[in-house]
Every structure is written in C-alpha cells, then in structure tokens.
C-alpha cells in the first residue's frame, strides 16, 4: 500500500514537472515570437527611413538638375 502511494506521488510529481516544462516552452515560444515581431518592425522602419532618404536625395538632385538646365538655357540664349 505504501509503495502504491509512493508510485502515485511520483507520477503526480512527474506530471507537474512536465506541465512546468511545457509552460516554460510556451513562454519561451511567446517571447521568441514577440522578439521576432519587434525585429521585423524595426527592420521595416529602417527600410522605410532609407527609402524616404533616397526619395529626398532624388528630389534634391532633380531640383539641382532643373536649376542647372535653367542656367545653361539662359547662358545659351
């Protein structure tokens, strides 16, 4: 009878251990998911910022080219 109780207690402890391990894995998976989402968000923001800078640079160059062409046109006439 005592052996049976010990065996039941061991099974109970094993189930509790397995539950804790499962909960820890779930928590780790959630933390990883959140970290991945944050990394993707930062990468997207950085990409958008680079694109914005490139667009601004292209606009600036186009304005310079337009001014240059106006000067050339005035000099030529």
Image: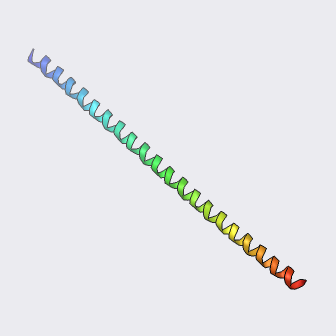
> Residue at the location (81% across, 77% down)?
70
From the viewer's perspective, is residue 27 above or below residue 36?
A: above
> Residue at the location (74% across, 70% down)?
62
Which image quarter holds the C terminus?
A: bottom right
Task: Residue lying at the far right in this picture: please name it.
Answer: 77
Position of 38 with respect to 58 (left or right) is left
From the viewer's perspective, is residue 54 above or below residue 40?
A: below
Task: Residue lying at the far top in this picture: please name it.
Answer: 1
Residue 52 lies, in percent from the top left, at: 61, 61
Position of 6 with respect to 28 (left or right) is left
Identify the image quadrant of residue 67.
bottom right
Position of 20 with respect to 44 (left or right) is left
> Residue at the location (13% across, 22% down)?
6
Residue 21 lies, in percent from the top left, at: 29, 35
Closer to the camera in the image, 45 or 77: 77
Closer to the camera in the image, 9 or 47: 47
From the viewer's perspective, is residue 32 above or below residue 66?
A: above
> Residue at the location (36% across, 36% down)?
26
Identify the image quadrant of residue 31.
top left
Which image quarter holds the N terminus?
A: top left
Residue 50 lies, in percent from the top left, at: 59, 62
Closer to the camera in the image, 31 or 71: 71
Task: Residue lying at the far bottom in this picture: please name it.
Answer: 75
């Amino acid at each position: 009878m005592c052996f049976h109780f010990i065996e039941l207690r061991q099974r109970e402890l094993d189930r509790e251990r397995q539950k804790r391990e499962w909960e820890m894995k779930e928590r780790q998976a959630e933390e990883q998911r959140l970290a991945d989402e944050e990394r993707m968000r930062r990468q997207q923001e950085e990409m958008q910022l680079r694109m914005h800078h490139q667009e601004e640079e292209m606009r600036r160059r186009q304005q310079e080219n337009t001014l240059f062409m106006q000067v050339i046109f005035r000099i030529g006439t």
